[in-house]
Image: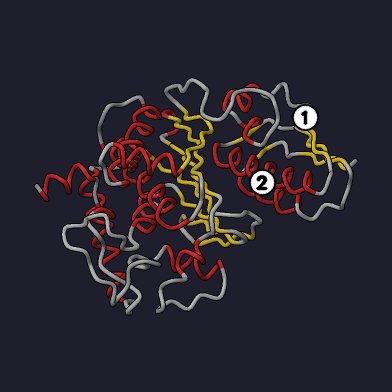
Amino acid sequence: MITLILPKRLTLDNAIDFCNKLWDVEDSDTYEFDFQFIRFTEPFTMLYVANELKRFSFLKKESKSKCQASNYKHLSYQSHMGFFKAFGLNHGNEPGKATGSSTYLPLTILDIEEIKQEASDKYLHIGDLLELKAENMAQLLTQQGDGDLVDTLTFSIREIMRNVVEHSNSKIIEYCAQYWPSKDQVELAIMDTGDGIMKGLSSNPFLHIESERDALHLALMPGVSGKMYKGVKKRKNDPWQNSGFGLYMTSRICRNGGDFLIISNNSGLLLNDEKIDKKCTYKGTALRLRMDTSKITTYSSMLEKYRNEGSDISKEFGSQSMVEPSIASTMLARDFNQKIE
């Protein structure tokens, strides 16, 4: 039996390091995940580790090995949030079943086909439906009905989820979040198990991408998209047409006092005051959005500022691969729908 001991503090670097080493362990008939030392976790690290443990367990069981866990019953917060059942251990709440409070959203798994069907049944564009879901998440997390924080979170959540639905080929969206009002900090984790960023950008003939790392650095440039580039016809009266500004706008919001992490398969990129590359073993795309809520100003003026900055960057480094931002990537649907009407 091989025992895999999880670190005491499941910080970002510790979680990535643990998961990277997970795939280098020797073959065994039994693997045991030992949780005895864990004292600290974050929304992103819970979701990230749960995904990797689930994938590890599935692959090992296919080769007839057994996976089990020990020393986990003292972890009431993680149990309540759905962490254990998220990777297959029969303990605690199912993902999405915990009663949310004024400070968190539990681990939740959404079926993308069900989202598409719901949009069809309600005669809504998928973007409009995702915005409604994002707004509900933002309101539950902050316990506020409206305001600049709700609007900013709604915009960011919608754009990340829209990227998953439009580009990833994933069957699911997973998320988890925590809000610390006393620290002026909110953290949101959103993940999928799809193709990753490199595959999503590969249909753009003007991009020359040799690695996931290249793809991540390109994807965070304003105006870079796998679906929209010079030569693709812009659809009239379609504010939702992809333009490659969503990730840039969201990352820019986070970097105003917080940070933005994106992982695609074997590469990660952390943006704060600098760019930090991460070596990873994930399958799909994982994002962590951290915002300093004290730095969130008027939602509309903030997005306009970042849109203008992005447009300038796009023009400065522009090529046939880069396009102007769409309406949807720079404001909420409720605002551009009013403009269209």
Residue 243 figure quarter: bottom left
Across and down, in percent, residue 101 comes to 45, 21
Residue 185 figure quarter: top left
Most foreground residue, 307 or 274:
307
Q: Residue at x 63, y 43 (%)?
A: 51
Tell me if 285 is positioned left or right of 4 in this view.
Answer: left
Residue type of the residue flagged with mark 1: Gln
Across and down, in percent, residue 154 comes to 33, 40
Residue bearing the label numbered 1: 36
Q: Residue at x 56, y 66 (%)?
A: 212
Tell me if 65 is positioned left or right of 89 in this view.
Answer: right
Identify the disc placed on residue 52.
2
Residue 5 figure quarter: top right
Q: Which element carries disc 1, helix, strand or loop?
A: loop
Q: Residues within 10 Å of mark 2 (few under 14, many from 20)?
A: many
Residue type of the residue flagged with mark 2: Glu
